[in-house]
Amino acid sequence: METAYIEVRNLTKTYSAKNGNVEALKSVSLSVLKNDIFGVIGLSGAGKSTLVRCLNLLERPDSGEVFIGGQNLLTLGREQLRLRRQKIGMIFQHFNLLEQQNVLANVCFPMEIRGVPVRQRKEKAMELLKKVGLEDKAGAYPSQLSGGQKQRVAIARVLANEPDILLCDEATSALDPETTKTILDLLKSIHDTMGITMVIITHEMRVIQEICTKVAVLDQGTVQECGSVTK
Ligand code: ADP
């Protein structure tokens, strides 16, 4: 049997809120293979965002383990975790672009943080913009772009760190059906050509059907079902 690339074991996470505790994750276990596009579907409040945030430890689980490539993230020191996290890209429903910066600067930003020299990062950013079909928008500002174009910028930006894992948290939920399809096609082609393991969080079954190879159904913090997606 192929070994898992992302392995989550017995994750639990409880938030304390004013009107009592919320058990967001109740002993969640999942195995994602290197080549998977792994979907996690569930209603709002099911625990999807909490789960995906536990995969890069943006959220610390109360108990359980997270292994990536056989490495237990919870045992890593601060610096090791920072370096590991750089290779775990994340895209979001609301794109999270820097509104005051143009498209090129947005894509350059993660490379600037890493200290990549200006010329090199601009070259790489242009290459990535070409990959997402936006080479003619390098000088535009986010406010001048459509939702689909903004998500393309976010995808180019996330690729700038050459991730081996991409976490997509409701990445197409703010987009119309047609645009959703084009973004999913782009993600699929990135997966196929760059060999990036993907975890896709969504509340929409058609997203799962469109690109996922596996799916886990999350309900009230528990995995109800998990299996391959039949096309
Ligand atoms: P989903 O992504 O499936 O909508 P979430 O993981 O965002 O679900 O939330 C799961 C549950 O945990 C919900 O009941 C939510 O209200 C609660 N929750 C999430 N984050 C927090 C937080 N920071 N503090 C308190 N409760 C939270």
Image: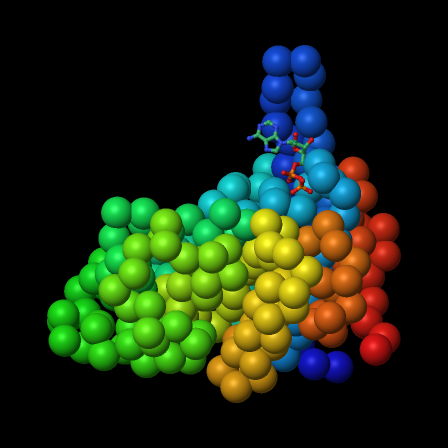
Q: Residue furthest front?
A: 144
In this orientation, which residue lies closer to the viewer: 167 or 64?
Answer: 167
Q: Is residue 135 left or right of residue 100?
A: right
Q: x, y (%) of residue 2?
A: 70, 81
Q: Quadrant of ligand 1?
A: top right
Is 156 displayed left or right of 206 in the figure?
A: left
Residue 169 makes an appearance in the image: no
Residue for point 69% across, 16% down? 20
Q: Residue at x 76, y 48 (%)?
A: 42
Residue 217 percent coordinates (x, y): 80, 54
Q: Is residue 72 above or below residue 45?
A: below
Task: Give residue 40's position: percent from left, percent from top.
Answer: 71, 56
* Quadrant where the image shows the N terminus: bottom right
The quadrant of the image that shows the C terminus is bottom right
Residue 96 rendering spot, x and y as whole percentages: 42, 49
Front-lying residue, 200 or 58: 200
Q: Which residue of the protein is positioned furthest toward the bottom in this rendering?
A: 193
Q: Would you say residue 163 is visible in this rendering?
A: yes
